[in-house]
Image (spheres, rainbow, N blue to C red):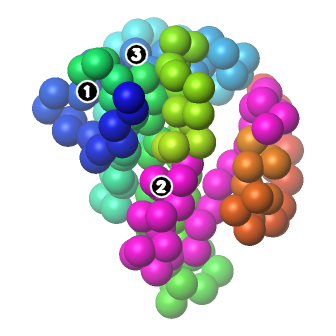
């Protein structure tokens, strides 16, 4: 059974770092992330400690098998609008079926409870089902980003 709960940075930090490493490997965007382990850990640390950052983890048998991080902040274009922006969303290869969906639903529910505008992302390397899931929950494509790897 999967339990979705708020992350405890004191006890879950190592699992969050390991999840971030796994994400980088599977996302295939190596050029975006720091090369040294020390710099990578520092970057993850800065992200999880951002003001307004909330992390939910998926736990099975006392093991973290997924996580989603949402940053709550005023919209750049309209500071009167609070956004809930997904900064990362990851599940382990060994995670039970539907773990990703459970994390997404829990994050979206929290965003709705707070009254924020949800902003979820899909990388070019994301599974095709991600966009279908977003649409199923009433999200629409609002942006496509371009960059150099």
Question: Total of numbered circles in the picture?
Answer: 3
The answer to which of 143 and 134 lies nearer the viewer is: 134
Is 34 left or right of 53, judged from the image as shown?
right
Q: Which quadrant of the rendered structure holds the C terminus?
A: top right
Please tell me how crowded label 3 is: few (under 14), some (14-19), or many (20+) other residues with Cα within 10 Å. Answer: some
Is 54 drawn above or below residue 59 in the view shown?
below
Dot 2: element: helix
Q: Residue furthest bottom?
A: 80
Is 51 left or right of 137, judged from the image as shown?
left
Dot 1: element: helix
**What residue is drawn where x is 64% and y is 80%?**
77
Please tell me how crowded label 1 is: few (under 14), some (14-19), or many (20+) other residues with Cα within 10 Å. Answer: some
User: Gap in Å between the C-alphas at discs 1 and 2?
Assistant: 19 Å
**What residue is drawn where x is 74% and y is 49%?**
133
Please tell me how crowded label 2 is: few (under 14), some (14-19), or many (20+) other residues with Cα within 10 Å. Answer: many
Label disc, if present, on residue 32 of the rendered structure:
none
Residue 67 seen in the current view: yes
Residue identified by numbered label 2: 107
Residue identified by numbered label 3: 18
**What residue is drawn where x is 45% and y is 46%?**
69
Check contact, mark 2 vs mark 3: CB within 8 A.
Answer: no
- Please state the horizontal and vertical placement of residue 31, each as a whole percent of the image: 68, 19
Label disc, if present, on residue 13 of the rendered structure:
1
User: Gap in Å between the C-alphas at discs 1 and 3?
Assistant: 9 Å
Q: Nearer the viewer, mark 1 or mark 2?
A: 2
Which residues fall within the magenta stretch?
A: 104-129
User: Gap in Å between the C-alphas at discs 2 and 3?
Assistant: 21 Å
Write down the quadrant of residue 10 in the picture: top left
- Please state the horizontal and vertical placement of residue 99, each as a whole percent of the image: 53, 33
């Amino acid at each position: 059974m999967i339990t979705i709960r708020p992350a405890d940075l004191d006890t879950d930090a190592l699992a969050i770092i390991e999840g971030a490493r796994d994400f980088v490997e599977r996302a295939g965007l190596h050029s975006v992330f720091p090369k040294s382990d020390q710099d990578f850990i520092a970057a993850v640390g800065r992200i999880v400690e951002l003001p307004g950052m909330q992390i939910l983890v998926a736990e099975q048998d006392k093991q973290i098998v997924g996580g989603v991080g949402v940053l709550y902040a005023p919209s750049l274009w309209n500071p009167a609008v609070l956004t809930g922006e997904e900064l990362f969303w990851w599940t382990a290869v060994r995670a039970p079926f539907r773990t990703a969906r459970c994390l997404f639903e829990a994050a979206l529910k929290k965003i709705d409870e707070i009254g924020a505008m949800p902003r979820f992302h899909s990388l070019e390397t994301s599974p095709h089902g991600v966009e279908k899931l977003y649409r199923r929950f009433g999200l629409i494509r609002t942006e496509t980003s371009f960059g150099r790897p």
